[in-house]
Amino acid sequence: MATASFVASADRDALVFQAEGDWLLATAGELDQRLRALQLPSGRRVVLDLAGVERLDTAGAWLLKRTDNELAARGNTVTLANVREHLAPLVEQVWAHSAAALPHPIPPHHTLGGFVARIGEVSVQLMRRAYSITGFFGLVTLTFVELVRHPRRLRLPALVAQMETVGVDAMPIVGLLSFLIGVVFAYQGADQLRRFGAEIYTVNLLGIAILRELGVLLTAIIIAGRSGSAFTAQIGTMQVNEEIDALRTLGLNPVEVLVVPRVLGLMLTLPLLVVYADFMGLLGGCLMSWASLGILIPTFLDQLHTAIGLWTFWVGIIKAPFFAAIIALVGCYEGFNVARSADSVGRLTTQSVVEAIFLVIVADSAFSILFSLLKI
Amino acid sequence: MQSQPDNITIRVRGVVNRFGAQTVHDGIELEVRRGEVMGIVGGSGTGKSVLLRTLIGLQRPVAGRIEVLGRDILHLREAEQRELEQHFGVLFQDGALFSSLTVAQNIEVPLREHCALPEPLMDEIAATKIAIVGLPEEAGDKFPSQLSGGMRKRSGLARALALDPEILFLDEPTAGLDPIAAAAFDRLIGDLKASLGLTVVMATHDLDTLFAICDRVAVLVDKKIRVGTLSEHLQDPHPWIRAYFHGPRGRAALDMNSGQHSPIDAGSQPLAGLA
């Protein structure tokens, strides 16, 4: 494979620019360097002699055209000469369609002003988001009110299907993780409390921690990762395929068809999942207490009975529907935000999980404050 | 790719494609000559896209042999396959642009992968391709979601042309374009073929495209393929082919293009009798 070269030789009053060899994409990098290093004349008559060019592609033709442009910009009169017949159509094509590459805009936020502007931009965006998510919440609430007035419009099959996928199908993972957390918690608690000879209080610790906080929080986080993301991806993909628009044109309300079954399904299922997670967590703790502390199961149950009241259990369960509403609403909301690109589905799915977990934990702290004010 | 014993770019022998129990192609025979535009037509579900995917190497046939640029593409090593693919340009139906990249970045993807070029030169080459496919200069900085369907097609074509391929595969290039844009796209393909010396294989339903730029047409019927020039197909007695080329749309396209092609010999097949 011959490389390309050029010879600038004085020929009477005109300068001859000779291109030779293969002007191809493969040699373009090297050619580009040589061309840029070249001292260009100005105010002369220049002949671009292509007699030596054996093979040419668009990249090579562009380099020739660029040289032509640069020569012309320096006040030379440039003429093309000896273009081989089979290369002529390509040369014509590129000469007719040459374009200067657009200069890349320099990102503005590397300056102090840009930095401040960016803070402002992000703040305004956040406020817009808060505004729009409140709007979405209102829309869903209105649809719920509408459904209470016309209960027959509730889509029962969709609701049941959602409850199955978000609830029943999540049981193995929720059960296993709660069990393991119970085991770990009992083990760590026993280790600390044994120093004070208060091993039996491991049961109190376990009961209160799992029933009040861990059961519900852990389940909510698993469900946010599992179902919240699925909601965003499903609705987002429908958005990309224009299915949401199709629903609208068919006279169906997308909120009623897609959002209500998901929100309601999750609100009904999450409390049940939490009960199950509580049970599995206590089971894990119970087995661990027996194995490491020798606390027998009847003793465990007796101690648990004295340690917790009914409210300990309800405090955990009450939070579940609220967490469920947060996860489902955020998941659906982000789904509707998807633009027509694959990239945006992935980005918003991640965002939906992060936001849901964040909001769940914020809500949990709010509940803690509320319960301590109510002295529960 | 210099040594081509004959003038055949793509040679397909006895290709069989089967999905489960359903046989789509049963012994496809096809030869595409260097520098020609080959149209592939067929009813819905006859496997136009499957055939195209088979030629590109995205779909492995159950049986048969496919030679592209003199090489058996079904028995290539990974590296040879990659090397060969640099001589292909593929335009998918809706452009298949990478949605997270701008048009210019999309065009630079193959350049970045296969050539070591300085950044400014890459931008210049991308800008040249954008101009060649007839997009406005600003299109380079736009994302695919900001473009109209026709502009996405042109951008997809620019990306397909990034490495100056020898063979261009087009899947329904004019589908979804308005007639003016479709005609312009046809002209563009014709121009590019002439100036870049491309061999073009396209699956299309657009009769105007077939009449305007295709040198030969491959018709998929009865799981086999019939290759010929348009005038040969117009004489074909097969009921589907007759219905296709002699239907109202076929005749309209024929009338429009008859000045250039005149595929019907006088007297041999009077069109008036077919209505």
Image (cartoon, rainbow, N blue to C red):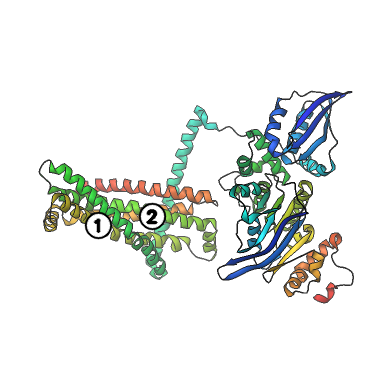
Q: Please indicate, yes or no, whether residue B171 appears anywhere in the rendered image.
A: no
Measured along the vertical axis of the image, is residue A14 above or below residue A256?
above
For residue A208, the mark is none
How many numbered discs?
2
Please provide percent x and percent y for residue A258.
45, 61
Chain to which the residue tagged by mark 1 belongs: A
Please provide percent x and percent y for residue B36.
77, 55
Residue carrying label 2: A226
Residue carrying label 1: A280
Q: Amino acid at mark 1?
A: Met
Measured along the vertical axis of the image, is residue B11 above or below residue B124?
below
Chain to which the residue tagged by mark 2 belongs: A
Q: Nearer the viewer, residue A120 or B144?
A: B144
Q: Does residue B165 appear left or right of residue A336 in this picture? A: right
Q: Nearer the viewer, mark 2 or mark 1?
A: 1
Please provide percent x and percent y for residue B248.
76, 70
Which quadrant is home to the N terminus of chain A?
top right
Q: Please indicate, yes or no, whether residue A288 appears anywhere in the rendered image.
A: yes
**Residue under disc 2 on the same chain as residue under disc 1:** yes
Residue at screen point 85% across, 43% down: A85
Q: Secondary structure at mark 2?
A: helix
Q: Secondary structure at mark 1?
A: helix
Measured along the vertical axis of the image, is residue A64 above or below residue B241?
above
Q: Amino acid at mark 2?
A: Arg
Residue at screen point 78% across, 43% down: A90
* Residue count near mark 1 (Cα–Cα under 10 Å), binned few <14, some 14–19, many ≥20: many
Q: Nearer the viewer, residue A349 or B118?
A: B118
* Residue count near mark 2 (Cα–Cα under 10 Å), binned few <14, some 14–19, many ≥20: some
Q: CA distance from mark 2 to mark 1?
A: 19 Å
